[in-house]
Amino acid sequence: MTLNIAHRGFSGKYPENTMLAFEKASEAHCSGIETDIQLSKDGVPVLIHDETLDRTSNGTGLVKDYTYSELLKLNFGSGQKIPALEDFIAFSKEKNLFINLELKNSIIAYEGIETITLNLLDKYSYPKDKVILSSFNHYSMVNIKALDISYKTGLLYDCWIYEPGNYCRLCRADAMHPQFFSVLNKDIVDNIKLQGFQINTYTVNEAEYMKKLLQLGVDGIITNYPDMLNQIMQ
Ligand code: G3P
Ligand code: MG
């Protein structure tokens, strides 16, 4: 059964990466949630897509220049506060959700973000088969495996990687996480799947492409509209 992964929560209808969007995704019966991790000035992992606050809150400037308590004063839409990763892990464990934690360390290489994230997952004994870490920074994903080989990793990319299955093995990863246009092709999907790796594609918001990817047999679809994907899967 293909995983229905809500991108930044139910971000098609609610403010992205907020507890409201995560709750609504769960109510819409997603199988999992994808979210983005950056670090505050005092090293607290917080959930926000951009390195800067401007697009999604009433704050300005870089997330990394504010302490967690300063970030908590901001409004991320509908009165929502910035979630800490710990809040999200506690919530998702309670709801028995699959989680895709994207480390946002390809623009700012937050030192220690891998260890901080794994330590929190360990603290909550998050089931290893219910979590995958991903990043556009593939060195970081190799680092995760060096820290704890039992955590799953996925390699994010938005280009047409040649022989993606071979590249996945090279990075000791468990999955490829392509922008979906680069895998609308049976040979490319097979190159990954026949070597025993998984494919979770992002960000698929149109019914036409959801159907195509389901036919191609991808393992997970990351979407802003988990409700639409559920309807198509039924
Ligand atoms: O993890 C899938 C997707 O979220 C990657 O791109 O920019 O939406 O974080 P972005
Ligand atoms: Mg993301």
Image: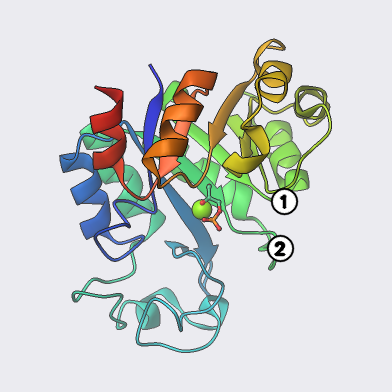
Judging by the rendered image, the residue that carries numbered circle 2 is 109
Tell whether label 1 touches label 2 (CB within 8 Å). Answer: yes
Question: Can the viewer see residue 96 in this picture?
Answer: no
- Dot 2 amino acid type: Ala
Residue corresponding to mark 1: 137
Residue drawn at point x = 29 percent, y = 29 percent: 232
- Residue sitting at 49 percent across and 28 percent down? 212
Front position among marks 2 and 1 = 1
What residue sits 53% from the left and 63% below the top?
A: 38
- Callout 1: CB less than 8 Å from ligand 1: no
Residue 72, picture quadrant: bottom left
Label 2 Cα crowd, 10 Å radius (few <14 / some 14-19 / many 20+): few
Above-or-below relation of 89 to 164: below
Q: Nearer the viewer, residue 83 or 54?
A: 54
Q: Is residue 91 above or below residue 210?
A: below
Using the image, tell me which numbered label, if any, was put on residue 101: none
State the residue in front, 218 or 86.
218
Task: Examine the rendered structure and indicate whether residue 135 appears above or below residue 121.
Answer: below
How packed is label 1: few (under 14 Cα within 10 Å), some, or many (20 or more)?
some
Where 216 falls versus 68 (above or below)? above
Q: Which residue type does callout 1 highlight?
A: Asn
| Quadrant the C terminus occupies | top left
Residue 23 placement (x, y as % from top left): 20, 49
